Image (tube, grey):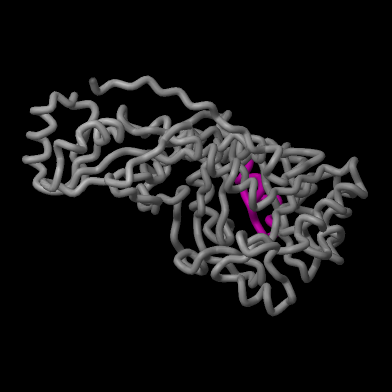
Amino acid sequence: MFSRTYTSPIMEHENASDSFYTHLPHGCQLCYEGAKMVLFVTGLCRKSCFYCPVSEKRMRKDVTFANERPVSSDNDILDEARSMNALGTGITGGEPLLVQDRVLGYIRLLKASFGRKHHIHLYTALTPDREILKELKAAGLDEIRFHPQPEIWDSLPGSGFDRSLEIAKELSMDAGFEIPSLPGSEQVAGFARDCDVFINLNELEFSQTNAEALKARGYSAMDDESCRVAGSRDVAYSIIQQDPGSKAHFCSSRFKDAVQLRKRLLRTARILGREFDEVTPDGTLFYGVIEGDVDGITGMLSLLDVPGQLFELRDGKVELAWWVLEEIASEIGDRFRSWYEECYPTYGRLVVERIPIDMGVDFTI
């Protein structure tokens, strides 16, 4: 009675994501697979980039997160990496090199736990010297991405970034730039070409922390349905079109949601999903919930011969296969509250939707 075979085709969205490139760094290749964990090592930063999208709960605070998971121990990082079968890690902030020892420790931890093939890249707005870069390389850093502020985009030669790039390349690290795609980006792209390194251009987005600064500078949203800044994509397209031989990559806002996040969620859902969880094409988990006297609910399920692997007691409620809930709805009646629920498989299991059972559910995929 309570069994179901389910297979779901995975929709590929790369062609609709608005991202394009002439060169894709290995770190980005893993992002395209949803296989990169984001390790936010600190919100501390001495720069004041007007477009910084870091949230209020992280900005200028010395906090660490592995994806959405707060980090208080090394095990938190390892648990998060295992939960998504991460093939690599992107270290970001804030300014990661303000907590250099922490960064070195995390790189060593990840390499020791997951092997040399676990690819690690780092973002920094600083110009580390040879000693620091040698330590990063010795710890296992594979790729470094520099983020100069717009104020110096027209004077990068002799700024220190050229020297740091040269040293990183000498140490056999992949190296390049990562900046927002906005007017003036072509200066950094030209410098990257001269240095024979890659450049990643990220689509500019409105966030709660940068909206006022962007509006004050005349930026506007592309449409009413997204946070994308109008014209950001056009800047990147023009740069790559004019120099198709460059090592350039435009990463769109849509890509981050439709591809990168969705594929990471799918990886996580397939690992953490319970036998009765439905994994949706978006990587969320779909199931049923019954709330009330837990002993009474489990007793009812036992009388109805619902197999134990198709339900679970969680947070004072019983969660179960949605198709089981659908079949036993008449038995529940007014005895208990029940609904269908969809959540992210990530830390904290953020609920994205609840559907009352009397509304039914059409879950045809």
The foreground one among 48 and 259 is 259
Q: Residue at x 68, y 73 (%)?
A: 214
Does residue 39 sit above or below 36 in this rendering? below
Residue 292 appears left or right of 269: left
**x and y percent of residue 141 in the render?**
61, 41
Residue 229 appears left or right of 96: right
The foreground one among 363 and 256 is 363
Residue 137 lies within the magenta run: yes
Residue 312 lies within the magenta run: no
Residue furthest to the bottom:
216
Residue 23 appears left or right of 104: right
**x and y percent of residue 317 in the render?**
19, 45
Does residue 181 sit above or below 362 in this rendering? below
Q: Residue at x 56, y 58 (%)?
A: 93
Q: Is residue 221 visible?
A: yes
Q: Residue at x 38, y 50 (%)?
A: 353
Residue furthest to the right:
242
**x and y percent of residue 301 in the render?**
13, 32
Which picture quadrant has residue 47?
A: bottom right
| Bounds of the magenta segment | 122-138
